[in-house]
Amino acid sequence: MPLEFFVGHAYAVLFLWVLVEQLGMPVPSIPLLLTAGTLSATHRVSGISALGAVLAACLFSDSAWYLLGRRFGARVVRLLCKVSLEAATCVARTEDYFGRRGPVTLLFAKFIPGLSTVAAPIAGQTGMPYSRFVLYDLSGSVLWSMTFLLAGRFFGDIAKRSQAFFGLLSHFAAALFVVMVAGFFIWRVVKRHRFLAQVLELRIEPSDVKAMIEGAPSQNAMPYIVDLRHPLDYLPDPRVLPGAVRIGPSEIASHADRIPRDRDVILYCTCPSEETSAKVAMQLHRLGITRVRPLRGGFDGWKQAGYPLHEYEDASFPKANLTAESFNTA
């Protein structure tokens, strides 16, 4: 019955399922695309119509997030990352890809968990022209959907050679689909849970950092604070915590020799649950810098607590010159 229902409503199911996923809900579409591709081998589902339904869903959802990102900026990105099961890499990875590749990021964004979640709103946040966004986004959607539809079709063509195997596959199709979806979901939940457990062990409260700053007898005794925010994140508020220096997450290894080993090192970002700070903290631990901890709540938590923020004045680390306009010419 589930298989017959899917065959009878394949394109509507594909459109709604992919739409829900692309709107930010953690429901994997890959098993459904593989199923549709497999059924296209029996001509019970049209591969072209399935592709059209998927592209329509991607264009609708991605355009909505693009417009919201253009209107509300970082607030929309943070909201999406809180829903995403890949929040550990959600903001930092996407902003890093956009900073290095610009619109080309959209061509492969849907293949990478976390990156696919926020690519569209970040494209809007950077001010990318909508026509350019649609061109790259649709091209990426075609590559993503065709990859799994064709993979399913290939499997279906092989299965057809054995009528007994194909009959068995058809009989248990619904169960196999449920197992695939559950497997994707459980794997991502477990991965996220393990990472967040590490974050909880490492992070430090804003009040404790403030006390450390105020109680330091000299400048050299103050904690060494690193602002890990991407330039897109500090465009709305360029201020930093007292004495903080700006170092991008991808640059931390090259600047490791400048980070003191005999002082507390505090990292902060704007990611949900301090994921970027925690990842950098663990990276520094592997480089021999052990007195390092993420700031609980990050920049937003410090700011909401009403603690002091200063203009960035550290000349030893040049200010990044990334602006929204740089993406319009990428």
Image (spheres, rainbow, N blue to C red):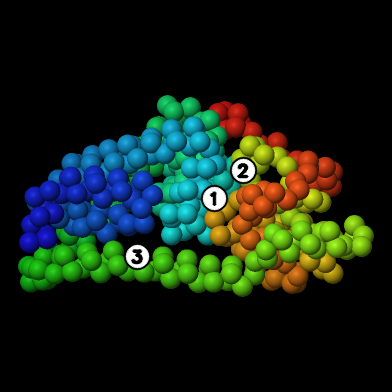
Amino acid type, callout 3: Phe
Quadrant of the image for the C terminus?
top right
Q: Earlier in the sequence, mark 1 or mark 3?
A: 1
Give residue 77's position: percent from left, percent from top: 50, 45
Find the residue positioned furthest to the front: 306
Q: In this figure, which residue is indicated by the disc labeled 2? A: 233
**Is the residue 307 above or below the residue 200 in the image?**
above
126 to the left or right of 80: right
**Is the residue 239 above or below the residue 260 in the image?**
above
Q: Are marks 1 and 3 in contact (CB under 8 Å)?
A: no
Rounded to the nearest whole Å, what is the CA distance between mark 1 and mark 3? 21 Å
Q: How many numbered marks have been drawn onto this rendered protein structure?
A: 3
Give residue 243's position: percent from left, percent from top: 81, 51
Decide if residue 162 is in sight here.
no
Decide if residue 116 is in sight here.
yes
Q: In this figure, which residue is indicated by the disc labeled 3? A: 184
Q: In this figure, which residue is indicated by the disc labeled 1? A: 91
Give residue 259's position: percent from left, percent from top: 80, 61
Rounded to the nearest whole Å, what is the CA distance between mark 2 and mark 3? 31 Å
Residue appearing at x 75%, y 70% in the figure: 291
